[in-house]
Amino acid sequence: MMSIGEIARQAGMRPSTLRYYESIGLLPVPARVSGRRFYDSSILQRLEIIRTGQQAGFSLDELRVLFDEVLESSAPGATWHGLIQRKLQELNTLLNNVQSMKRLLEDIMECDGAALAECIYLTGQKHKLQET
């Protein structure tokens, strides 16, 4: 058993983060000795899954679905597949928006100072037409 401070140090997190994760159900309620939280070292694996999931764009609510419905399920495939499909759609939309903004900014860079406002307006209109 490891104290919350030891777990936090090893996971590279603050103890308040661990308490928050516990309060929203991402971490199981730990054993307490004299009011202090003590975790089994296996909690480090769960924290790494949370960190990796967040880096991949999963929200804490989505990670809770992973822990509560997917990993605990006898048939996790359908739930997990649906969650990944939604996340892929979100990422594709985000990627398209970023690429569109990048093209718009590159075109605006070609505008000269004298007619900057008009050029920016026309460039924006051109991109609006391309998106439809």
Image (spheres, helix red, strand yellow):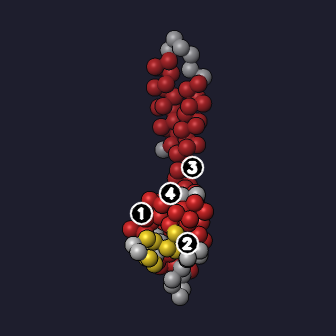
Residue type, label 3: Leu
Q: Report x, y in % for residue 31.
A: 45, 78
Locate the N terminus by quadrant: bottom right
Mark 2–mark 1 distance (CA, rounded to whole Å): 18 Å
Residue depth check, mark 2 versus mark 4: number of the one nearer the observer: 2
Residue type, label 1: Tyr
Helix, strand or loop for disc 4: loop
Q: Is residue 104 above or below residue 25?
A: above
**Cβ–Cβ below 8 Å for labels 2 and 1?**
no
Count the numbered circles shown: 4
Which residue is labeled 3 in the image? 95
Residue type, label 2: Met
Helix, strand or loop for disc 1: helix
Q: Report x, y in % for residue 75.
A: 54, 86
Tell me which numbered mark, 1 or 4, is placed earlier along the sequence: 4
Residue type, label 4: Arg
Tell me which numbered mark, 3 or 1, is placed earlier along the sequence: 1
Q: Nearer the viewer, residue 57 or 130?
A: 57
Which residue is labeled 4 in the image? 14
The quadrant in which residue 110 appears is top right
Q: Report x, y in % for residue 20.
A: 42, 63
Which residue is labeled 1 in the image? 20
Mark 3–mark 1 distance (CA, rounded to whole Å): 31 Å
Helix, strand or loop for disc 3: helix
- Identify the residue at image location x=55%, y=33%: 104
Tell me which numbered mark, 3 or 2, is placed earlier along the sequence: 2
Tell me which numbered mark, 2 or 1, is placed earlier along the sequence: 2
Q: Which mark is on residue 2?
A: 2
Residue depth check, mark 3 versus mark 2: number of the one nearer the observer: 2
Residue depth check, mark 3 versus mark 1: number of the one nearer the observer: 1
Q: Nearer the viewer, residue 41 or 3?
A: 3
Instruction: Name the outermost residue toward the bottom.
Output: 74
